[in-house]
Image (cartoon, grey):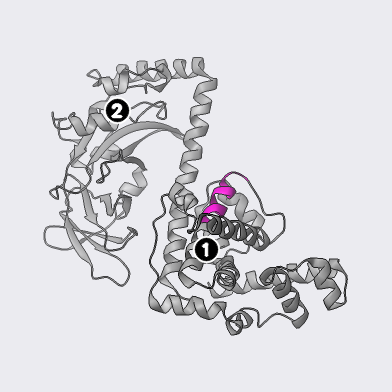
Amino acid sequence: MNAEYFDTLEQQLVLASERLSNEHVERRHRRWVGRRPLVVALVAMMCASTAFAVSDQAPWSPPELTLRANPEDVPPLIGAPTPTSLTSFLGVLRTPQSEADRGAVTRDALKFFNGGTPGGIRSNGIRSIVFPDSKAPALVVVPYDEQTATGSETKLAVWVTDPTGAAGGTVRATLDSLRRPVVTGSSGEYVFGFAPDGVTHVRLTWPDQAPIEVPVTRNAFMARAATNPPLFPTVTWLDADGKTVPALD
Amino acid sequence: MALMRDDRPDQDLLSATRRGNAEAFAEIYRRHYRLVLAYLIRRVRDPELAADLTAETFARALLAAHKGRQARNDTAAPWLLGIARHTMLDSIRQGQAEDRARRRLGMQTVALSDEEVDMIAEIGSNDGLMRLARELPVKQRDALIARVIDERDYPEIAEELQCSEIVVRQRVSRALSILRDRAGDTA
């Protein structure tokens, strides 16, 4: 049986299963934090002291992050700059943080970041990305540190606003995924992703649809999906001459 | 859709789903959606409603799998058909297709094409059902249709087929396993 309905249903179930798994991880983490407040506090202090040791400036401390009814919901803040593993190919993270980056969209997004980032948030690296399409969702890019088997890695939590006016949601982008032409996530009928310096637009291709090209704004793209629900298209990075830009090594 | 067939038993796939392997549940879906659809269309006689209830059935099964609920048999088919039955009864009670699980999962309603409506209606016909089960040995096919499609009790089927209840259960179980394997071959 070859039916689009059932193929679409399969894709929706896979995405839903991924979301449920992420929710489980978040819940387990919150339970862990709840049971071990003292340990978390010590870890937070260690992270903070390490950060100040290598930082040349204090972290931006917006009240949306630091003023919480429950102290355990305050994530550690790191003043150190975003590492070159990310800034080397994402210019948006190299440009100085502007007032717009600290504006209303960002502050709304930060209300939803809590103790789920025990490694700490690099708050001076937070950037907001607003797209030319005024109806499109905006992105807030939040670098955060996460402990891995081989040490600490800085990843990006990407907050995407909801075009319908609901709160929005976060997607976590690993260094590996940022170096490949892929869609990072969706919001409403839009899909979005990132592209390295030198990529000026992207070509998005859905099965049985004519490809579309959309511009890249501050290393990110946002496009209305050609399918409903918004299935993830194949992404091709293109430079100013229209030539394909390969995935980064 | 599947790039590679996953030969693990359904129980292992459900455990993998619980551990965060989203593709494992896709394999469960590919193996069994035809059977669930056939079960539902035979009862509701409305292709669009049957497709809707199939989607809700798998959404409920996904939520259950993530809560650690497991099929008791090697094949998840009886478990899924049980969920399908409850979903259908809930919908009848409410006078509309249940969609709570899909809303919980943020799944959007997908429209059926005319071609898909015809295809589902064909599955619901006796011919379609027999095609689904055509590779089964006759005894297994009879046991499967009596139990899964017609929902008759095991003692009643055993009496009709002149064998023990245990034998009927074995035939149904083997028939479901064969259908599962066939679904894997054609996915």
Q: How many marks?
A: 2
Which residue is nearer to you in this view: B48 or B78? B48
Label 2 marks a residue whose chain is A
Name the residue rendered at 45%, 19% in the picture: A43
Amino acid marked by disc 2: Arg
Q: In this view, does A117 lie to the left or right of B81?
A: left
**Span of residues in magenta:** B58-68
Q: In this view, does B175 lie above or below A153?
A: below
Residue under numbered circle 2? A122
- The quarter holding residue B82 reads bottom right
Q: In this view, does A104 lie to the left or right of B175?
A: left
Name the residue rendered at 54%, 48% in the picture: B63
Rate crowding at label 2 as few (under 14), some (14 to 19) or many (20 or more) other CA atoms within 10 Å.
many
Label 1 marks a residue whose chain is B
Amino acid marked by disc 1: Thr
SS under mark 1: helix
Residue under numbered circle 1? B54
Name the residue rendered at 31%, 17% in the picture: A67
State the CA–CA distance, disc 2 to disc 1.
45 Å
Q: Which of marks 2 and 1 is in front?
A: 1
Q: Where is residue B44 in the image (x, y as percent from the top left)?
A: 55, 69
Residue B2 in view here:
no
